[in-house]
Image (tube, rainbow, N blue to C red):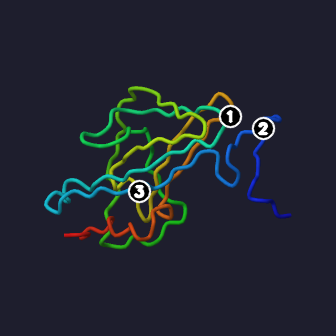
Amino acid sequence: MRYSRLVLITLLGCVLALSGGQPLVFISFDHVERPPASRRDVDPGLLYLRIRNNTRAAIHIFAGPPEASALGVDLLHEIVEASSVPAHASGWVLPPSRYSPADVVTTVDIQPNADLLFSVPLNHVGPWWKLRIAFRSEKQPDGLVDFTWADVPKNERHAWKIDAAK
């Protein structure tokens, strides 16, 4: 059976999704900011993303202070190995050897049908690892949302090459 793109997700008779065909909560690519070539050995650059709340209730996400000179907020996230791991090819930025989330300072609320710009170091997403964010809401179960290598536009992936724009 095929469903139309306008699918309303219901829980106990309450419509949760605001926009049919979209996940309840999702992360989208915004842009990449690379440091000057002389600093790339110590600074991988920043990946700017937007987390979108497509539900009828606010969602809550833990956040810390943003990195110096970064736009947006620093959302608490995990770095997770992708389920379909390709062979690790040389020449790509590597995931951090260790990642310790900042002490949680606050909870950020994202209202219904709204999004929030945030940034993470570029190497928190890559060909064989992804970024994961947990969120809460009073009107739905706790959830997880991922941003994967497949979500990075193909024309932007060159930024993850070690020798990109040197």
Q: CA distance from mark 2 to mark 1?
A: 8 Å
- Classify mark 3: residues with Cα within 10 Å, few (<14), some (14-19) or many (20+): many
Residue 10 image offset from top left, x and y in percent: 78, 41
Q: Secondary structure at mark 1?
A: loop
Instruction: Residue 132: give x, y in percent of width and height.
Output: 49, 47
User: Residue under circle 2?
Assistant: 11
Q: Amino acid at mark 1?
A: Gln
User: Which is more toward the observer, 96 or 62?
Assistant: 62
| Whole-number angstrom distance, CA of label 2 to CA of label 3 | 32 Å
Of the residues under marks 2 and 3, which one precedes in the sequence? 2
Image: 61 above or below 154 = above
Q: Are marks 2 and 1 in contact (CB under 8 Å)?
A: yes
Sequence-earlier tag: 1 or 3: 3
Image quarter in which the C terminus is found:
bottom left
Q: Amino acid at mark 3?
A: Val
- The residue where tag 3 is placed is 125
Instruction: Judge from the rendering whether residue 100 lies leftward or rightward of residue 136; answer left or right.
Output: left
Where in the figure is residue 5, as x and y percent of width and height? 74, 58
